[in-house]
Image: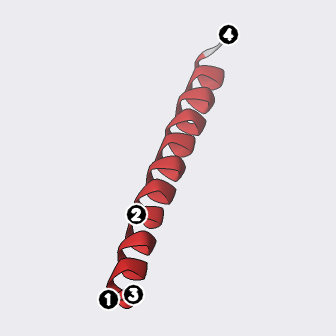
Amino acid sequence: MNATTILVHASSRAAVRDRSESSRRHRRLRQHDRARFAN
């Protein structure tokens, strides 16, 4: 395994983690909006 492969794997893993974190945050915001509109 060379340095570029390690770099690509690390960056893609970071991108996947950021995407899942942002989707989780977005889902929480959407639930908050739904609760606010329901009241």
In this figure, which residue is indicated by the disc labeled 4?
Answer: 1
Distance between mark 2 and mark 4 Cα atoms: 39 Å
Quadrant where the C terminus sits is bottom left
For the point 44% across and 49% down, which residue is it? 21
Is residue 35 or residue 25 the one in the foreground? 35
Q: Nearer the viewer, mark 1 or mark 2?
A: 1
Mark 2 or mark 3, which is nearer the start of the sequence?
2
On screen, residue 13 above or below 23: above
For the point 45% across and 66% down, which residue is it? 26
Q: Secondary structure at mark 1?
A: loop
In this figure, which residue is indicated by the disc labeled 3?
Answer: 38
Q: Are marks 1 and 4 in contact (CB under 8 Å)?
A: no
Distance between mark 3 and mark 4 Cα atoms: 54 Å
Residue 11 sits in which quadrant?
A: top right
For the point 62% across and 32% down, which residue is it? 8
Q: Nearer the viewer, mark 1 or mark 4?
A: 1
Q: Callout 4: few (<14), some (14-19), or many (20+) C-alpha neighbours within 10 Å?
A: few
Q: Are marks 1 and 3 in contact (CB under 8 Å)?
A: yes
Distance between mark 1 and mark 4 Cα atoms: 56 Å
Quadrant where the N terminus sits is top right
Mark 2 or mark 1, which is nearer the start of the sequence?
2
Q: Which mark is residue 28?
A: 2
Horizontal and vertical percent for residue 20? 52, 48
Mark 4 or mark 1, which is nearer the start of the sequence?
4
Q: Callout 1: few (<14), some (14-19), or many (20+) C-alpha neighbours within 10 Å?
A: few
Q: Secondary structure at mark 3?
A: helix
Horizontal and vertical percent for residue 25? 40, 59
Q: Nearer the viewer, mark 3 or mark 4?
A: 3
